[in-house]
Image (tube, rainbow, N blue to C red):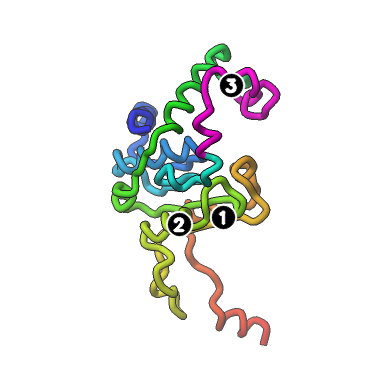
Amino acid sequence: LEAMGNDMADIVKALGYDKVDVMGYSLGGGVAFRMAVQHPEAVRRLVLVSTGYAADGFYAEMRGQQAQVSAAAADFMKDTPMYKSYMAVAPRPQDFPKLFDALGNFMRQDYDYSADVAKLKMPVMLAYGDSDMYRPEHEIKFYQMLGGGLKDAGWMRENLSQNRLAILPNRTHYDVFFAPELTAAALPFLYGETKVKTWDEVVSETG
């Protein structure tokens, strides 16, 4: 992931951008995380979708399944949306087994990036499905490590964190990334919108 984080920063620079908003899902979220940690000067805002900071964030049964991922399993994926999506855009479709080998090698690692979370000084949004492959306590801990979810925001939102946590109902790891409600949550964050109607304003409108 560290190398891919550097690669993404190089791509952004090659395209002529000094600073960009970055959004990543699953493994792509891990790449986005590493890019933001290693090249914070290049990231204005960060959205991590269905992304954890450590391998122990997954449910135990998921770790067992991930350990089985290898090139040998590629043939069993040919009727899946993942395979079809890869075939639609990959410059070398025949390398799908190599992708699976690389994925398996990474997922078998007992990685832990918790020490790097504090390096994320830019605004960060975490988004998950309520039936994701990550344990809810891991998601909450991630948010708390970013400084959110530690106290009540206050009547005037004076304690509101710059970071956000979105738990999308009726969504899983396998469909959260194309959920319309994810777009609805992420865009205001990326635009830097924080203003909402106050309780007093709502009462005044209905009075």
Q: Which element is circle 3 on?
A: helix
Callout 2–callout 3 Cβ contact below 8 Å: no
Residue that appears at 43% across and 46% down: 56
Provide the residue span drawn in magenta.
63-86
Q: Is residue 47 magenta?
A: no
Q: Badge 1: few (under 14), some or many (20 or more) residues near its Cα, within 10 Å? A: some
Towards the viewer: 73 or 155:
73
Which disc, if any, is residue 73? Answer: 3
Q: Is residue 34 above or below residue 119?
A: above
Q: Which element is circle 2 on?
A: loop
Three-letter residue code for mark 1:
Ala
Q: Is residue 94 above or below residue 47?
A: above
Left or right? Give the position of 22 relative to 207.
left
Magenta region, main secondary structure: helix
Residue that appears at 30% across and 47% down: 116
Q: In which quadrant of the rendered image does the C terminus lie?
A: bottom right
Is residue 61 in view? yes
Instruction: Tell me the CA gap for discs 2 and 3.
Output: 43 Å
Instruction: Tell me the CA gap for discs 3 and 1.
Output: 35 Å
Q: Which residue is mark 1?
A: 185
Three-letter residue code for mark 2:
Gly
Q: Is residue 75 magenta?
A: yes
Q: Badge 2: few (under 14), some or many (20 or more) residues near its Cα, within 10 Å? A: few
Which disc, if any, is residue 192? Answer: 2
Residue that appears at 34% across and 44% down: 113
Towards the viewer: 114 or 32:
114
- Horizontal and vertical percent position of residue 21: 43, 44
Residue that appears at 65% across and 49% down: 171
